[in-house]
Image: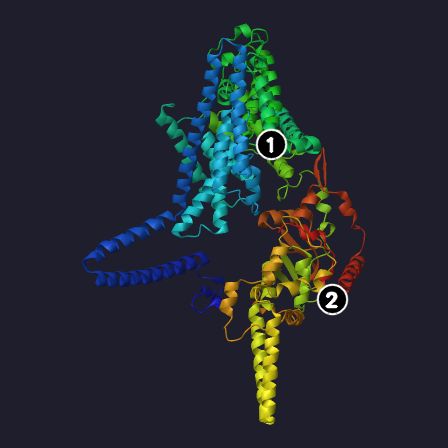
C-alpha cells in the first residue's frame, strides 16, 4: 500500500523463520485509516461550519440564531431525505396505497356489473346485454386510452423491465404519462371481469413509481441520477410490485430475482425486502382500517390441519401433479405465441386490425363474455365467481363431492357456484380448466395493461382441485397410517397446482413461497416445492418462459438464456459467429477518412487501430466524439482564424512592397486590393446566414456524393441531421467565437477549397476521449463463456482480437442468433452449421495461415470508409 502514496500507512511486516508475515491484519489497518480520515473530515467540516455560523451571527445580529437553526434543520431534513431507507419506505407506502385503491376501484366495477345482472333477472336478454356491455365498454376504453396516451403501457411490463435491467434503454417506458395510462388502463381492464392479472402490471407500476420518485429526490441532491442507483431502485421496485398485490414480501423479492434479473447483486437484497415489507404491510393494514379484516392476516387464509398435513403416500400424487402442470404450462406459452403469430402472418387481418385497433379487443371481450354468460355455458364453469372468489373456494380443505355425486355436496356459500344439477363436480372442474386455459391465452393478447399471473394461478388451482377430488374419490375413507385415518384434503392439491402451473409458465421456483404466503400456511411447503420443481423441469425442456416468449414476440434486445442439458453449445466459439467486416479508423487517418466512415454507417462506437496493416487494437471512440472532432476541424472559428492569418500575411506582404517600391506603386497596389475585396463582397449573398456557408460545399463534394454506400432514409436514421449539425454550428456560438475584427470575405469556391485542405489533414486524437480498454474476446472463447460475460457485465458488443490484432466483433445480435438458431422439441440448441465453419481437426499452423489471409485482406483496403456496409452496422449498441 505504501507504493501508491506516502500518506497511506504501510502494513507492519516482520521476518520469521520461513516466509515472513504481516504483523497487522489488512482489515484492521483499513478500519483505523478510515476512522482517522473520518475524524479529520468531521473536524474540518465542524470548523468550516462554525466559521460560517459565526460570520452569520456576526452579520445578522439578533435574527442570526433563528436563521442558524433554520439552516441546520434544512440541512438535516435534506440529508435525511437522501437516505436510501427513506426512499425505499416511501416507495413501499406509495405502491401499497396504490394497490389498495386499485382493488377498490376494480371491486366497484365488478359489483356494478353484478348489480345490473341481478336487477334484470326477469329478462334473460337484458341480462345478457348487461353482462356483455359492461366489459365491452371498459376494455374498449382501456385499449383506446392507453393507445392514445402511452402505448408503452400495454401488456404486463415484465419483459421490458428485464430488458431495462439488462442495460438497454427503452424510451418513454418509465415516464409519468406511462404511469397514468398504466394505472387507469389496468383498473378498467380488470374491472371488466376478463381473465386478466394485476400482479405483472404492478411490477411495471412499481418501477414507474421508483423512477419518478428517484427523479423527484434528485431535486434535493444526492446521486439519484446515477445509473447504478436507478438500477438498484428498479430492482427493489420489481419486488414491491408483487408484494403489494399478494401481501407476500419474501416471495415478491425471490420472484423479482428469478423473473427480472439475470445476475443479482447481494447489496440490493435488503432494499428489496425493506420496500416489499412496507408495501405488503400497508396493503393489509388498509384492509383492516376499512373493516374487511379484523387483523393483518394472509390474503386467502386457509385452515389446513397442522398435526398431520399430508401422508407420505400422497407425494407421488403431488409429483404427477407437478409433471402435468409442466406440460400444461408449456402448452399455454406455445398457444399464446401461436395466436400472436397467426394474427401477424395473416396480412389482410393484420392490416384491418391495425386500422381498427379497438375492434380486436372488442371482439375478444364479446366472445369471452358470451361464453361465460351464467344462464348459458357459464353455468358449467362457475362464471359468476370473480378470480379471488374462485381461489377462496378452490383452496377450501373440505371435499366437495364423494365419488363425484353432486347431491352430496354439502358445503354452502360461494362454492355453490360449482354445483350443477345435471353434471358432477369433475365435469365442472374439467370444463373450467379447459375454457379458462384458452380464454386466458387469448385475453392476454389484447392491447390493454394486463398480466397472466393470477389467471394462471386460478387455472392451476382448479387443476389441482381436480386431482385432489380424484384422490378423495379413490380414497373415500382416507389413507390409513399408524392405525389412524386421515382424509384427503383437495385444497392442498389446489395450492400445489397453483404454485406448479404458475412456476411452469414463468420458470420460477419462488411461486411455492408466494402461494404459502398467500394462504398463510407453510404446512404443505415440501409437496408444493416438489411439484414446482418437477413442473419447471418439464416446462423448461419444452418452451421458454412466458416472459422470454414475449421478449421474442416483441423483438426486444435481450439476450436469451442458454438451453440446459445440451453439450453442443460448448463446441461453438466466437470466431464462428463474429462479424469479420469491422468498421474501424486508423491512428494516422485524415479527416476525410473520418468523414467517410461516419457517412457510411450509423455505429455508435468505432474501433481505433494502429494501422490498416497491423490492425493492432488501440481502443474505441464513440461516434459523438468523432463528430465533434470533424466539426471542430471545419468550424467557422478555424476558418476565421485562417482569414486573420491570410489578412496578416497579405498586410505584411503589402508593407514589404511599399517599402521597396515608390509611392505611386504603393497607391496602385492599395487600389487593387480594395477593388478585389469589394468584388468578393459583391459575390456573396447578403441574405444567406453565415453559419450555413460550409454546408453546401461540404454536401456537394464529389467524394461525398459518389460514395458507394447509400445513406439510409428510414425514420430512425438521423445521419442527415447529424451531418447538418456536424458542419453547421450554432449562430450564437459562432458569434461568441468571432472577435469581430475580421470580416468573412471568402467565396463559396474558396470555402470549398479550404474544407478540402482541412479534410486532407491528419486527425489529432489528443483532444478526443478514447476508451483505451474496450472489452475484448479471443477467437477461441466459447459461446457459453461469452453468454455468461455478456449477461454478467451487461455488454452490447465486444471486439474479437488475436494477439492484439482486431479480427472481428460480436454483438447481442450475433449472440442471440447463435442461441436461437435452432429451437427443437428438445430445447434450445446452438446451430451446428456454425461449428462446421471451423474444422476441428485443423492444426494451429493452418489456423495461423487463415489468420494471415484475413490480415492480407485488411491490408489491401485503402480507406476504412470504402468498405461495404456490413451486418455489424445494424448491431444495437
Q: Is residue 268 left or right of residue 597?
A: left
- State the image coordinates of residue 790 (x, y, percent, origin top left): 62, 49
Relative to the observer, which residue lies in front, 448 or 229? 448
Frontmost of labels 2 and 1 is: 1
Q: Is residue 235 left or right of residue 821?
A: left
Relative to the observer, which residue lies in front, 653 or 554? 653
Q: Secondary structure at mark 2?
A: loop
- State the image coordinates of residue 461 (x, y, percent, origin top left): 55, 22
Q: Earlier in the sequence, mark 2 or mark 1?
A: 1
- State the image coordinates of residue 351 (x, y, percent, origin top left): 67, 33
Label 2 with label 1: CB-CB less than 8 Å: no
Most extreme residue toward the left is: 62
Residue at x 54% of width, y 19% of height: 132
Q: Is residue 321 something one can see in this rendering?
A: no
Q: Is residue 715 something one can see in this rendering?
A: yes
Badge 2 local density, few (<14 within 10 Å), some, or many (20+)? Answer: some
Q: Secondary structure at mark 1?
A: loop
Q: Which mark is residue 743?
A: none
Q: Is 449 situated above or below 681?
A: above
Q: Quadrant for residue 99, please give it.
A: top left
Relative to the observer, which residue lies in front, 726 or 686? 686
User: Which residue has dot 2 on it?
Assistant: 613
Q: Is 868 situated above or below 202?
A: below
Badge 1 local density, few (<14 within 10 Å), some, or many (20+)? Answer: some
Q: How many tags in the picture?
A: 2
Q: Is residue 72 left or right of residue 330?
A: left
Q: Is residue 65 left or right of residue 189?
A: left
User: Which residue has dot 1 on it?
Assistant: 357
> What's the colour scheme?
rainbow
- State the image coordinates of residue 669 (x, y, percent, origin top left): 61, 86
The alpha-carbon separation of the residues under discs 2 and 1 comes to 56 Å
Amino acid at each position: 500500500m505504501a507504493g501508491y502514496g506516502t500518506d497511506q500507512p504501510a502494513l507492519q511486516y516482520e521476518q520469521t523463520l520461513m516466509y515472513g508475515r504481516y504483523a497487522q491484519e489488512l482489515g484492521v489497518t483499513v478500519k483505523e485509516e478510515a476512522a482517522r480520515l473520518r475524524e479529520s473530515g468531521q473536524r474540518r467540516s465542524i470548523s468550516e461550519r462554525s466559521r460560517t455560523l459565526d460570520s452569520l451571527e456576526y452579520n445578522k445580529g439578533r435574527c442570526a440564531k433563528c436563521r442558524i437553526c433554520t439552516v441546520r434543520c434544512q440541512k438535516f431534513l435534506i440529508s435525511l431525505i437522501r437516505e436510501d431507507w427513506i426512499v425505499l419506505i416511501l416507495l413501499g407506502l406509495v405502491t401499497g396505497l396504490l394497490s389498495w385503491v386499485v382493488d377498490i376501484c376494480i371491486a366497484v366495477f365488478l359489483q356494478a356489473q353484478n348489480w345490473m345482472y341481478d336487477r334484470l333477472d326477469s329478462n334473460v336478454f337484458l341480462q345478457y346485454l348487461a353482462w356483455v356491455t359492461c366489459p365491452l365498454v371498459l376494455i374498449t376504453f382501456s385499449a383506446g386510452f392507453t393507445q392514445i396516451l402511452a402505448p408503452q403501457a400495454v401488456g404486463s411490463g415484465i419483459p421490458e423491465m428485464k430488458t431495462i435491467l439488462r442495460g438497454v434503454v427503452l424510451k418513454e417506458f418509465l415516464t409519468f404519462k406511462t404511469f397514468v395510462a398504466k394505472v387507469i388502463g389496468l383498473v378498467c381492464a380488470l374491472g371488466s371481469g376478463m381473465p386478466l392479472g394485476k400482479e405483472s402490471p404492478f411490477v411495471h407500476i412499481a418501477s414507474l413509481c421508483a423512477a419518478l420518485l428517484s427523479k423527484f429526490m434528485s431535486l434535493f441532491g444526492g446521486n439519484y441520477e446515477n445509473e447504478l442507483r436507478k438500477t438498484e431502485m428498479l430492482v427493489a421496485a420489481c419486488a414491491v410490485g408483487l408484494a403489494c398485490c399478494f401481501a407476500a414480501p419474501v416471495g415478491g423479492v425471490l420472484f423479482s430475482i428469478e423473473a427480472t434479473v439475470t445476475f443479482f447483486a447481494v447489496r440490493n437484497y435488503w432494499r428489496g425486502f425493506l420496500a416489499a415489507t412496507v408495501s405488503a404491510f400497508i396493503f393489509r393494514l388498509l384492509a383492516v382500517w376499512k373493516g374487511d379484516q379484523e387483523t393483518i392476516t394472509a390474503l386467502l387464509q386457509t385452515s389446513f390441519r397442522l398435526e398431520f398435513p399430508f401422508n407420505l403416500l400422497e407425494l407421488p400424487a403431488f409429483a404427477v401433479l407437478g409433471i402435468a402442470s409442466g406440460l400444461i404450462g408449456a402448452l399455454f406459452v406455445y398457444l399464446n405465441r401461436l395466436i400472436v403469430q397467426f394474427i401477424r402472418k395473416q396480412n389482410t387481418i393484420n392490416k384491418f386490425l391495425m386500422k381498427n385497433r379497438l375492434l380486436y379487443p372488442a371482439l375478444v371481450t364479446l366472445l369471452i363474455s358470451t361464453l361465460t354468460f351464467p344462464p348459458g355455458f357459464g353455468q358449467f364453469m362457475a362464471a359468476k365467481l370473480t378470480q379471488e372468489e374462485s381461489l377462496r373456494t378452490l383452496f377450501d380443505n373440505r371435499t366437495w363431492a364423494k365419488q363425484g355425486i353432486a347431491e352430496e355436496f354439502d358445503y354452502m356459500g360461494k362454492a355453490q357456484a360449482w354445483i350443477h344439477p345435471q353434471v358432477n363436480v369433475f365435469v365442472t372442474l374439467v370444463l373450467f380448466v379447459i375454457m379458462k386455459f384458452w380464454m386466458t391465452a387469448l385475453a392476454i393478447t389484447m392491447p390493454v395493461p394486463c398480466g397472466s399471473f393470477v389467471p394462471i394461478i386460478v387455472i392451476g388451482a382448479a387443476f389441482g382441485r381436480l386431482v385432489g377430488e380424484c384422490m378423495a374419490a379413490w380414497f373415500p375413507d382416507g389413507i390409513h397410517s399408524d392405525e389412524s385415518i386421515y382424509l384427503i384434503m383437495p385444497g392442498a392439491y389446489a395450492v400445489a397446482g397453483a404454485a406448479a402451473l404458475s412456476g411452469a409458465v414463468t420458470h420460477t421456483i419462488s411461486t411455492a413461497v408466494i402461494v404459502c404466503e398467500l394462504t398463510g400456511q407453510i404446512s404443505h411447503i415440501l409437496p408444493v416445492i416438489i411439484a414446482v420443481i418437477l413442473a419447471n423441469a418439464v416446462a423448461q425442456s419444452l418452451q421458454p418462459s412466458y416472459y422470454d416468449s414475449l421478449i421474442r414476440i416483441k423483438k426486444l434486445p435481450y439476450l436469451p438464456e442458454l438451453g440446459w442439458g445440451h453439450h453442443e453449445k460448448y463446441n461453438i466459439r466466437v470466431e464462428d459467429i463474429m462479424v469479420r467486416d469491422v468498421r474501424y479508423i486508423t491512428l494516422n487517418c485524415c479527416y476525410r477518412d473520418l468523414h467517410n466512415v461516419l457517412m457510411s454507417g450509423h455505429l455508435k462506437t468505432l474501433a481505433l487501430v494502429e494501422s490498416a496493416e497491423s490492425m493492432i487494437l488501440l481502443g474505441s471512440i464513440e461516434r459523438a466524439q468523432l463528430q465533434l472532432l470533424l466539426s471542430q476541424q471545419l468550424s467557422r472559428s478555424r476558418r476565421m482564424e485562417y482569414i486573420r492569418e491570410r489578412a496578416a500575411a497579405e498586410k505584411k506582404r503589402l508593407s514589404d512592397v511599399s517599402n521597396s517600391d515608390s509611392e505611386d506603386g504603393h497607391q496602385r497596389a492599395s487600389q487593387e486590393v480594395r477593388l478585389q475585396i469589394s468584388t468578393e463582397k459583391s459575390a456573396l449573398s447578403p441574405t444567406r446566414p453565415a453559419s450555413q456557408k460550409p454546408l453546401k460545399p461540404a454536401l456537394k463534394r464529389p467524394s461525398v456524393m459518389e460514395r458507394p454506400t447509400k445513406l439510409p432514409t428510414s425514420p430512425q436514421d438521423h445521419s442527415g441531421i447529424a451531418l447538418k449539425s456536424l458542419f453547421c454550428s450554432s449562430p450564437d456560438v459562432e458569434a461568441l467565437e468571432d472577435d469581430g475584427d475580421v470580416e468573412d470575405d471568402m467565396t463559396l469556391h474558396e470555402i470549398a477549397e479550404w474544407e478540402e485542405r482541412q479534410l486532407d489533414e491528419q486527425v489529432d486524437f489528443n483532444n478526443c476521449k478514447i476508451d483505451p480498454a474496450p472489452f475484448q474476446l479471443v477467437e477461441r472463447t466459447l459461446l457459453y463463456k461469452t453468454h455468461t460475460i455478456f449477461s454478467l457485465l451487461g455488454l452490447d458488443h465486444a471486439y474479437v482480437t488475436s494477439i492484439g490484432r482486431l479480427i472481428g466483433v460480436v454483438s447481442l445480435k450475433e449472440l442471440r442468433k447463435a442461441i436461437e438458431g435452432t429451437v427443437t422439441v428438445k430445447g434450445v440448441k446452438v446451430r451446428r452449421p456454425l461449428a462446421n465453419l471451423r474444422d476441428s481437426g485443423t492444426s494451429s499452423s493452418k489456423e495461423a495461415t487463415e489468420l494471415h489471409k484475413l490480415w492480407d485482406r485488411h491490408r489491401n483496403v485503402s480507406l476504412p470508409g470504402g468498405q461495404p456496409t456490413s451486418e455489424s452496422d445494424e448491431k444495437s449498441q
